[in-house]
Image (spheres, grey):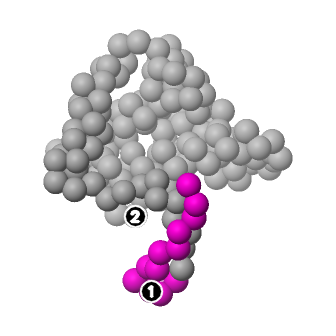
């Protein structure tokens, strides 16, 4: 399949292979159902061990390194790409969980709370429960934030 060039609203040319088409009518509903149904009926969290990439065991080394860096400990972050990836993953996931929890009013944290402070708090809370490290990191992070910033 050859390249075609399409022009955006701003007049810039972009390459288009024609692989993605805008869904219309029933296609849109079918696409929405294909995305939403697995999210609604996925396996319940915490019932079985999570996959390696989403478990606290996988993410926590990065959280510990990032937490140490935030607290000012020298050489907390290394030149190891995987360790730095996990540190960034932890930072992003904690920020996303905090924003989601706040938007759904599950977490009532002060406006002045910073992502770094939340990351240190989540790291301490999850490290305090090593028996749960095989569970999903996002679930544990949400529970830690709800425990520390409950909505009354």
Q: Please determine whether, in this image, residue 87 is positioned above or below residue 113.
A: above
Q: Which mark is residue 10?
A: 1
Residue at image position (42%, 30%) is 140
Residue nearest the viewer, comparing 11 with 76: 11
What kind of element bears circle 2?
loop
Residue at image position (57%, 64%) is 3
Q: Position of residue 29 (x, y in %)?
A: 18, 46
Q: Position of residue 112 (x, y in %)?
A: 40, 64
Asked whether the beta carbons under mark 2 and mark 1 sit within 8 Å of each other, the answer is no
User: Does the segment drawn in magenta span residue 37?
Assistant: no
Badge 1: how crowded within 10 Å, few (<14), some, or many (20+)?
Answer: few
Q: Position of residue 139 (x, y in %)?
A: 38, 31
Residue at image position (52%, 46%) is 119
Residue 36: image quadrant is top left
| Residue placed under numbered mark 2 in the picture | 112
Q: Is residue 110 visible?
A: no
| Tally of numbered tags | 2
Q: Is residue 70 visible?
A: yes
Residue nearest the viewer, comparing 82 with 29: 29
> How far is disc 2 from disc 1 in space, using C-alphas?
38 Å
Q: Which residues are magenta?
A: 1-12
């Amino acid at each position: 399949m050859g390249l075609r060039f399409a022009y955006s609203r701003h007049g810039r040319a972009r390459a288009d292979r024609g692989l993605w088409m805008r869904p219309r009518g029933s296609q849109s509903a079918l696409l929405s159902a294909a995305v939403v149904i697995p999210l609604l009926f996925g396996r319940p969290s915490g019932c079985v061990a999570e996959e390696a990439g989403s478990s606290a065991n996988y993410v926590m080394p990065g959280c510990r390194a990032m937490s140490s860096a935030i607290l000012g400990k020298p050489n907390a972050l290394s030149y190891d790409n995987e360790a730095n990836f996990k540190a960034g993953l932890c930072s992003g996931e904690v920020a996303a969980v905090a924003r989601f929890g706040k938007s759904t009013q599950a977490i009532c944290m002060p406006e002045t709370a910073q992502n770094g402070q939340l990351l240190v708090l989540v790291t301490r809370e999850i490290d305090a429960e090593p028996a749960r490290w095989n569970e999903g990191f996002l679930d544990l992070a949400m529970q830690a934030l709800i425990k520390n910033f409950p909505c009354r």
